[in-house]
Amino acid sequence: MTTEQTDFDDDAFMARAGASPMGLLDECLKTHVDLETAEKFRRKTREAGTDTSGALRDWIYQVVHGKTFTDIQVDAAKSKREALFGTGPALDQMGPKL
């Protein structure tokens, strides 16, 4: 059995652990649908490369915040990258780099 080190900033880990750029993902929302609809939805989400939880989460965040959860995570990752490499609009206002 091999052990693999996990980067705790990894997006997949964050979603499973319940952490996100907007705080803990600790509130559960669920619904019931008929079997045929459930099968079609699961197929559609698999074809899109996600799962039912990810698709529902993206839909909820799009409706509430105007951005999917995936988009919010991408924006947070870009901000981290910009901070690491000293790029981006916020850092450009700080003056010349040394």
Image: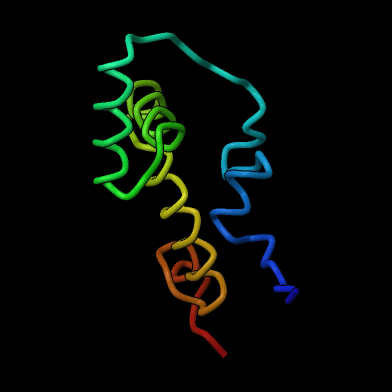
Q: Quadrant of the C terminus?
A: bottom right
Give whichever of 55, 2 is nearer the camera: 2
Give whichever of 53, 37 is nearer the camera: 37
- Left or right: where does residue 96 sit relative to residue 37? right
Quadrant of the image occupied by residue 88 = bottom left
Q: x, y (%) of residue 26?
A: 67, 27
Mark count: 0
Q: Quadrant of the N terminus?
A: bottom right
- At 34% from the left edge and 27% from the top edge, which residue is drawn? 59
- Left or right: where does residue 18 sit relative to residue 64? right
- At 45% from the left edge and 10% from the top edge, which residue is drawn? 31
Q: How is the image coloured?
A: rainbow
- At 50% from the left edge and 15% from the top edge, which residue is drawn? 30
Up/down of 23 relative to 78, above or below:
above
Q: x, y (%) of residue 93?
A: 46, 67
Up/down of 44 relative to 12, above or below:
above
Q: x, y (%) of residue 50?
A: 37, 45
- Left or right: where does residue 87 sit relative to residue 24? left
